Every structure is written in C-alpha cells, then in structure tokens.
Image (spheres, rainbow, N blue to C red):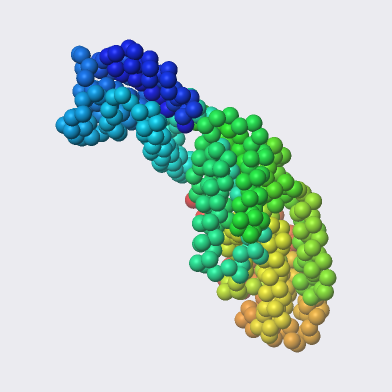
Amino acid sequence: MKLKLLIVDDEPIICQGLKMTVPWDEFCVEVVGEAYDGEEALSILEETHVDIIITDVNMPVMDGLELAEKVAKRFQHIRMIIISGFDEFEYAKRAIRLGVSDYLLKPVDIDELMKLVKVIQKEMEKERDKTSIFSMKQLLSSIVMGQEVDINVNLKDNNFSGYQFLCSEIDDYDSTISQVNEDDRKLLKQRWKSKISEELRIKGLMSVSLFLDENRLLTCCKVMNDLSDFAELFYEVVERVSNQLGFSLSGCYSSLGKETHDILKSYQLVTEGIEIVHCIAEKVYHAKTLPTHVTDLEITRFEKCLSKMLSDEHPEIQKIIGDLFTHFEKNQMCLLNDVVNVLKKLEKKLFTNLPVYQYLRFSENVNITIYNSYKAIKCLFMKDIEDYIRFQSTTQGGQHWLIMKAVNYIKENYASDLKASEVANVINVSPNYFSQLIKQETGTHFNDYLHDVRLNQAKVLLKETPFRVFEIAEMVGYKDYKYFVHIFKKSTTITPTKYRKIVTDLSGES
C-alpha cells in the first residue's frame, strides 16, 4: 500500500530537505507535493489524493493547527504529523484534540519520523482493509440476493483491477462428512471459510466468503494489481486448504470483472460452472471454458427393464441400475439436478402401487451440494429401490402390489374379451385368490369392476367424440349393442343417447 505524502512548511529549504533526504520509496511513500502555508495546502488537497500531511505549526496566512482543524472537518481520512520548534505543551494538547497523529520537535529525528510513518501506514492499512471488507460483504450479499450492485467507489482506485469469484465444494460430501456430528460439521465449515481467506491473503488477494448451500462456498476476491496466472493461484489455494482440512476440495473460478455487468456475468458463470464439478477431471477449473451441459437424457429402455425386474423380482436389478448410471456418466456434461429430476419421474412411474405414507428419498428435494457425485445419487436411488422391494415382500405390500398390477392390466385391456382367469394368470395367482384380492381392494367383483372401467371410458367417448353409440359400444368391449345400452342404463338410469344429449347441452351452456 503506497501512501501519498504532502509536506507543508513556510521554509522551502525544510520542504526540500524532508523530500530529498528521507528514503520515502523504501517505506512505500510518495511525496505528491509541497506547500508553504495552510491555504496552499488546502488547494492541493482539492486536486490531489493525500494520505499523510507533515506540517509545521508556525506559518503565515494559515498555521499548522488551523490547517489540522480544517483537514479534520473536510478530509477525515488524512493523517497529520505536526513538527515545530516550539516546545510548548499547549500546542501538543491542541494538536491531539484535533486528531493529529503525532507532534515532533525540530530538528526532526529521521528515524523517529520513519517509525511514526510506519505506525500510521499499518493503522491506515487496517482501516482500509476493514472498510474494503465491509464493502465487499455488501457487494457479495447484493449479488447473491439479486439486489442492485454498486462498485463505483472502487473504480476511483487506480490500483483496483476488479473482482473474481471462486466457488468450492468438498468432494463426495455425503460419504465424507456423514459420520461427522453437527457441531463438528459447523466447525469444519468455519475452518474451510477462514482457510480460504487466509490462503488468498497470502497470495495478495483480499476476500470475503459465504455459503450458498450446505456444501458450496462462494468467495469474492478483490484484485488490486494484475495477476497473470490465476489458474495456478487458485489451484494452489484449493490444494493447500484441502490438505489443511483433511478433505478433498474442488473449485471453479471466474474471469476478472471490473464493471458491474462483467462482475454479474462472472458470478453467473461460476455458480453454473460448479454444477458440473462431478464431470470435470481438473480439481480447479475456469468457468469460462465449460462446454454446454446435456439436459436430454433418454432412459426409456432402462425404465422398461426396471419395471419388468421389479415386477418379477429379477436378481439382476443392480446391474440395470449400474448401466443406468453408466449412461449418465457417458453424457459427461449431465448436471446432477437433471439426473435427480429424471430419477424422480422414473420412481413416479415405477412405484405406482406405493401408499402415500411410504417414504421415498426422491419424493423430496435432493440437495446436490450434499449428494454431489453420481455415486451418492446412485446410492440414494438404490435405497429407494430396496425399500420398494422390501415393501412388496410384506403381506400388505405384496397384496397391494399384485392388485395394482392387475388393475393396470384391466385398464390397458378392457376393450378385449377380458376374463378373470386371464388377469389372475398375469399376476400368477389362482382365479379364486384373485377374486378375493380385487373384492378386498375395490369393494366389487371382477365383472362389476370391469363394467365400471368400460362405462367410464364410454362416457368420455360419448362426450368428446362424434362416434355413434354402437361404435362406442364395440370400442369399450361390448360386442352386443343392446347389452351395452342395458348395462349403461342400469348404471346411470339413462340411455347412452340421452346421456350424450345432456352432457352436450351442458357443454354448450358453459
């Protein structure tokens, strides 16, 4: 941090002496001007950024104490050192009240002056860091919350190069952290966050971090000078933090952004980039280089195989699930969120006979920052499959599964000349046992249930299609038109023709 210094003294020789004899460069101090009274100093402050003023007390026009008073009101960030040939306690007391950093006597001891400058420099660095960290926290919070972002204050700093983001995750979080209790998990996250900040500070980057999720840490870095190799820098930081935590980390980093638009774009890319951390070979990678991910996952053949195997209690079910996840992994840019959504739909189709109280892991939101690998997702899916098979093996579950399989078969084949013995054969039970099951499940005998299915479909066709009544009778499984009318009237108290007229008139009124 290079400080800007203004020297103020009514004796030019003293100004030149302080400027030329002190090795300011060695202390990262740049002399930006000289003034010969307080008014001239104020004029310079209007045009030039100054961090420290060294001023004499006894000067014409405006003395050093009056200058200190005006600086304290208008330029609060400036630190002042007053030098004087007057060893008077009243000067010192007034200077301290005005916030002057120190009061030195002429002739100035250069070593003493340099010690004082070093102290001021450290204090100002701490203050700037504190202010900068606060503004960065506000920036990061605004970005994440989707609020308006203001970075104009940083653009005034000539050393400011921009902001850069790093998003990191612990690999295989579920299996790695599953045995860690909640308190230790909180401590681990605190250490992770602080170690990232510490390692970045060693590299010369100020940073703030926040957790976007259980296992996703977003870090915003403030870059004050151009750095050439960010890839190596972030790799070393992530590698060192991994070693210190004892857990493997992966990370995705963004490009440098200075303008608001570029910063928001970098944030968007890095949060999208970390979504495919499970697909990338590198431990740390650049968000800008990522290819487009795959969203269309065709799994029809796996669905059919699983459906058959679940029905038949096939012993090779683990192989099919293994093949399914191999299919996911071959689509290298397949997001875990897409995999989860596919498996949710698959379970909904496969587990149609489960009661509502039966717990399924994919019926809830699956946090992909916790289950952040194909292995973890596969394990969850396999547990649901095992629970489903276990439910089927119970008396209640097995019976329910059998009858639901029978009901689905009836709904698919009601238009054919369907017999109870045929359905019983499909679910591998005797006709008598099947009659007991369907009566127990539906409250009716097989023939009555079949009539209900057929008549419900006939009502849909009467309402929504122009087919004639005898055609609809055949379409729903009745070869004898008169018998169809008889059964329809017995169920609804009106003929099919009258039913069509009523529902058509009602539709017209609406």
Q: Residue at x 68, y 85 (%)?
A: 395
Residue 386 image-quadrant placement: bottom right
Left or right, 370 with reference to 389: left
Q: Which residue lies furthest to the left in this view?
A: 90
> Between 240 and 178, which is closer to the camera in this rendering?
240
Q: What x and y, as percent, mark residue 415?
A: 76, 66
Residue 70 image-quadrant placement: top left
Q: What x and y, as percent, mark residue 311?
A: 77, 73
Q: Residue at x 68, y 61 (%)?
A: 377
Q: What x and y, as percent, mark residue 406?
A: 73, 75
Q: How many labels does the image show?
A: 0
> Between 351 and 495, which is closer to the camera in this rendering?
351
Q: Residue at x 40, y 18 (%)?
A: 19
Q: Residue at x 57, y 46 (%)?
A: 199
Left or right, 201 with reference to 323: left
Judge whether residue 277 can be spotted in this image: yes
Judge whether residue 147 can be spotted in this image: no
Rendered position, 241 above or below 180: above
Q: What x and y, as percent, mark residue 174?
A: 63, 63
Rendered position, 327 above or below 387: above
Rendered position, 137 above or below 423: above
Residue 317 image-quadrant placement: bottom right
> Between 449 and 344, which is closer to the camera in this rendering?
344
